[in-house]
Amino acid sequence: MTCFVLALFAAEALLGAEDLRVGAARVEITPAADAALPMSGYAGRKDGHRSVHDPLYVRAVVLEAGARRAAIVSADLIGFSHEFWAHVAGRLAAEHRIPVSHLLLAATHTHGAPSLRDAYAQRVEDSLSAAVAQAASRLAPGRVGMGVGRANVNVNRRALQANGSWYLGINPDGPSDKTVAVVKFESAAGVPLAMFVNYGVHGTALGMRNSAITADLPGATSRWVERHFGDKVVVPWTSGAGGDQCPIYDRLDDRFDGMEAMGRILGDEVIRVAASITTTGRVSLGGAQKVVTCPGQKAVPGLTKGAPPAFVDAAATSIRLSLLRINDIALTGVSGEVLTLIGQRTKSESPTSNTIMVTHCNGSSGYLPDDAAYARVSYEIKSARVKPGCAETAIVKGLVQMIQEQTLEGRALSADK
């Protein structure tokens, strides 16, 4: 099945290394406890939130190397539509000189945040701009480095049911990537400024019966690390290829102890990894984006319970691929919920070993399964808007090609200097 490239956005080649400048900021987006905003993430949850358990934040890191500037931004939300992302990306480019090709805007995918609509959507938009503005205002000479660790707080959730079907559950034998990736940003004197964290898991420690605002496992992790550093470090959390991964303590409804425990486990690993990272103050900074499209499908509604699902053709689905390159660190963004094997294949085929996949990034394309996953029709397959045979190749080949192009162009331009 053919996948077509719709658009290739301007890609700035990697020039010779420049001195790095770094700034970071955190802006709160927690709604009022009595606002009763509609919550996102669970279709069966109809009422608005009734309380606040823990705060929601936008966290931003702005990088500058010579004339080039980039931003990594995460927000404690379910996700961003293509339209919302495009509007915000344009605003950040106009107000803060962040090129669209150099922006990674990712949602943590917590299922305990309000839906992005009406006045709250405007507040989030303004807070995204404010966080980037604050981070940019704090730009100062800095250093960067990357390390990886491992944490056992996720598990494959595509589970075999008693009737032979596949649905949400626990599948310890299914593919699961336990990698914790950490990119550390620090001052020129070695004082930590920000820790970018990436781990493949859903923000679903709390279930659909929870009515309290919460940043879920991602937020618990960020808060634990930030507290460790006296709240002087900003910790943007992003999801890896976790479309088929749930927390080991999952859908706890309104019991928060399991969520906090997993946040501590993951956070302690982040702290341990960060302590061993070697950093540099000279960087080559580059970015690129492209949009690919896959043939669409949708499940036929109203089938008899237990009957095999049926699918019909639907509108094609666009997938935005993004790359932010910091020396040999490749932060690759995908605008959807990517299943584990696609993430692992991307890292395996990438020309750099320091490849990180950031999902729920720069838009929303729904579930993006690997080709083999379609043989077992689970929740993720029923919800996917793409036909089999396209997304895996489009994502892996697209991102690998973008990394290769950046590397080759950067070498050529560096040789000319």
Image: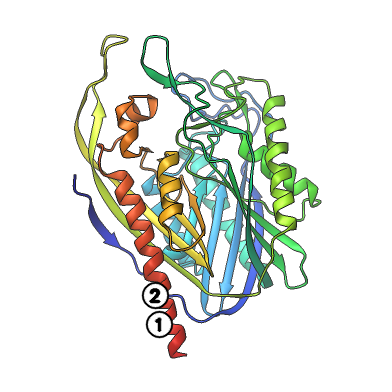
**Would you identify the image quadrant in which residue 135 lies?**
bottom right
Circle 2 — which element?
helix
Q: Is residue 30 left or right of residue 188?
A: left
Which residue is at 71% across, 65% downward? 186
Kind of residue at disc 2: Leu
Which residue is at 21% across, 39% downward? 315
Residue toward you, 284 or 229: 284
- Residue 278 % position (x, y): 69, 65
- Residue 230 % position (x, y): 81, 51
Which residue is at 36% across, 37% downward? 369
Residue 71, placed above or below residue 140: above
Number of other residues with Cα within 10 Å of mark 2, as a class: few under 14, some 14 to 19, many 20 or more: few
Which residue is at 33% across, 59% downward? 290
Residue toward you, 247 or 101: 247
Q: Is residue 124 left or right of residue 90?
A: right
| Mark 1 in CB contact with mark 2 (< 8 angstroms) | yes
Number of other residues with Cα within 10 Å of mark 1, as a class: few under 14, some 14 to 19, many 20 or more: some
- Residue 364 % position (x, y): 39, 43
Between the C-alphas of marks 1 and 2, the distance is: 6 Å
Disc 1: which residue: 412
Residue 300, placed above or below residue 282: above
- Residue 349 % position (x, y): 40, 56
Residue 314 in view (yes/no): yes
Disc 2: which residue: 408
Kind of residue at disc 1: Ala
What's the image's color scheme? rainbow
